[in-house]
Amino acid sequence: AVPLVVAVSTSLAAQNGFLIRNRTAFEEARNLGAIIFDKTGTLTHGEFGVTDVLTFNGFDDKEQLLSLAGSLEQNSEHPIARGIVKATDGLMKVEEFNSITGKGIEGRVDGKQIKVVSPGYLREHNIDHPTEQYEQLSGQGKTVVFVIINDQLQGAIALGDSIRDDSREAIQSLHDMGIQCIMLTGDNRQTAAYVANELGLDDFFAEVLPEEKAAKIKEVQQRGLKVAMTGDGVNDAPALAQADVGIAIGAGSDVAVETGDIILTQSNPKDVASLIALAKATYKKMV
Ligand code: ADP
Ligand code: MG
């Protein structure tokens, strides 16, 4: 039988914007030492808008650069893709589309081989890029992706996302409970550092590939902390499973929701703080 206080908490939980799928994990939530948040769509709104288009290496048609990149991005579900498609007129047909997991996408558009990729991809393939504007844009917290046309680096697209006010409040409450707040993202280091600094986070991991996320959770557990992970994507499932408490965003992918111990039905990071407070209150009464 379920103790009465726990049953009451379960219905309180639903009213407060979360669903408990795993009661043991909920009980663990009162002992958490760190919460790891996915950046895009959790701490930020996850709604990107194009802010700057740069061209280089002899290419100077910004409209064409956007149109080639935007056409390719029609095939991607990434928030970056939605931002670029919104900014593009004249979408063209794409052939041989392929996604480069955690790094970008590629395909043929208008007879050209196009890639839209992360700064990390360029580094890995020893492709030089103009650094001054890049550093300025990423230092402002913008996400920058590069456009390669027929193996020539021809431009970059900067996109802005915004930090949710709810994230600031969530971090404040978690800090008040003595819990460390850490961010995990596939985005580049400078962009991540900007967000981490704005929110006053205790630590962050940037340029993390999807298959590396679970290992980062383990790394924090090895610091001797009970860890919760909050994420929404298909790629977040192994990290949610590795965490002592896996918290899935209700509006996220089915895979994340099925893996999560607790689901945030309102997709609000503040509900992480409420669920910990409720776990502490519930199990204190039981001792
Ligand atoms: P996150 O969920 O933190 O954004 P991802 O692993 O989904 O991490 O993406 C990591 C990086 O890979 C992005 O910041 C971007 O540089 C690049 N990337 C991923 N998908 C795309 C895409 N559709 N178009 C361009 N770049 C992409
Ligand atoms: Mg993601």
Image: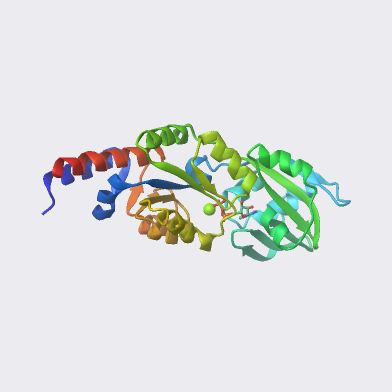
- Residue drawn at the location 53% of the way across and 60% of the way down: 210
- Residue nearer the viewer, 122 or 176: 176
Residue 110 percent across, percent down from the top left: 78, 60
Q: In the rendered view, would you say 277 is above or below 27?
A: above
Give the left or right position of residue 140, taking residue 156 as reference. Answer: left
Q: Quadrant of the N terminus?
A: bottom left
Q: Residue at x 32, y 37 (%)?
A: 274
Residue that protrudes farthest toward the right in the picture: 58
- Work out which residue is located at the far bottom of the displayed protein and give it: 96
Q: Viewed as shown, does residue 68 lie left or right of 260?
A: right
Left or right: 60 as drawn, with respect to 240: right
Image-quadrant location for residue 238: bottom left
Residue sitting at x 38%, y 56%? 243
Q: Quadrant of the C terminus?
A: top left
The percent coordinates of residue 74 (x first, y second) are 63, 54
Regarding residue 130, the answer to whether it shows in the image is: yes
Quarter occupied by residue 275: top left
Number of residue marks: 0
- Please indicate, yes or no, whether residue 247 appears anywhere in the rendered image: no
Q: How is the image coloured?
A: rainbow
Q: Is residue 269 above or below residue 111?
A: above
Picture coordinates of residue 130, whole percent (x, y): 80, 48
**Corner quadrant of residue 272:** top left
Q: Position of residue 229 (x, y in %)?
A: 41, 51
